[in-house]
Amino acid sequence: MEGRNVSVAALQFACSDDISVNVSSAERLVRTAHKKGANIILIQELFEGYYFCQAQREDFFQRAKPYKGHPIIVRMQKLAKELEVVIPVSFFEAANNAHFNSVAVIDADGTDLGLYRKSHIPDGPGYEEKFYFNPGDTGFKESVGISGSQRQPEQWYFKVQRYCFTPQQLALNPKMKVLILVIIGSE
């Protein structure tokens, strides 16, 4: 089986504490990336608000929402279906008594392909993530000819830290394992 070319765009933008403004910005940039030919569009990590993990505050747990019926995931499902693009959607997940830094992968037909919960949780000045997030328990699943087979811890894979507006070409070989990561927002 021959590989196929896809175009990947990585988005990054300044976030505020206004969820509707941030999600509208993400949607606008997804549309722009699609117009430039992107098939897979990566929005930065936890884009619903500014990066809150710089301090330990109990009130920030109110930002977490359950995976099922999450309004941002539902909105991005509609957008992915409309534009026929794949969109991994990062969000702060509340699951029973646990909290996760999670990603729902939305296929080009709007189908939610499943959930990934981040495993490597950094901890240090400005990155108080262990206060907010439990280590993930989902692993990766193969789908859409793209696999998230992880052979090394997440921190050893590249992480895009600048806004990349021009979609980049990526050849996918069905025998090759390709990992799509959440974009880490810069400070």
Image (cartoon, rainbow, N blue to C red):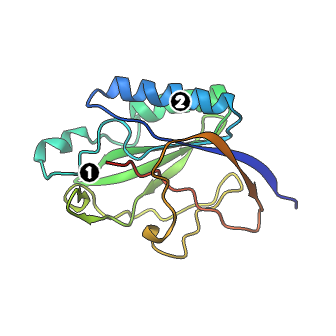
Q: Is residue 51 above or below residue 79?
A: below
Percent of width and height locating residue 165: 58, 38
Q: Nearer the viewer, residue 174 or 143?
A: 174
Q: Examine the image and state in which quarter residue 50 appears.
A: top left
Q: Earlier in the sequence, mark 2 or mark 1?
A: 2
Amino acid at circle 1: Asn
Name the residue rendered at 46%, 35% in the picture: 73
Q: Nearer the viewer, residue 35 or 144?
A: 35
Name the residue rendered at 35%, 35% in the picture: 48
- Mark sitting on residue 177: none
Percent of width and height locating residue 87: 56, 41
Question: Which secondary structure, mark 1?
Answer: loop
Name the residue rendered at 52%, 25% in the picture: 28
- Mark sitting on residue 96: 1
Which residue is at the far right?
1
Percent of width and height locating residue 22: 38, 29
Q: Residues within 10 Å of mark 1 (few under 14, many from 20)?
A: few
Percent of width and height locating residue 112: 55, 42
Q: Examine the image and state in which quarter residue 166 appears.
A: top right
Amino acid at circle 2: Leu
Name the residue rendered at 81%, 52% in the picture: 4
Q: CA distance from mark 2 to mark 1?
A: 33 Å
Question: Which secondary structure, mark 2?
Answer: helix
- Mark sitting on residue 29: 2
Q: Is residue 147 above or below residue 88?
A: below
Work out which quarter of the rendered image holds the N terminus and state it.
bottom right
| 59 with respect to 106 (left or right) | left
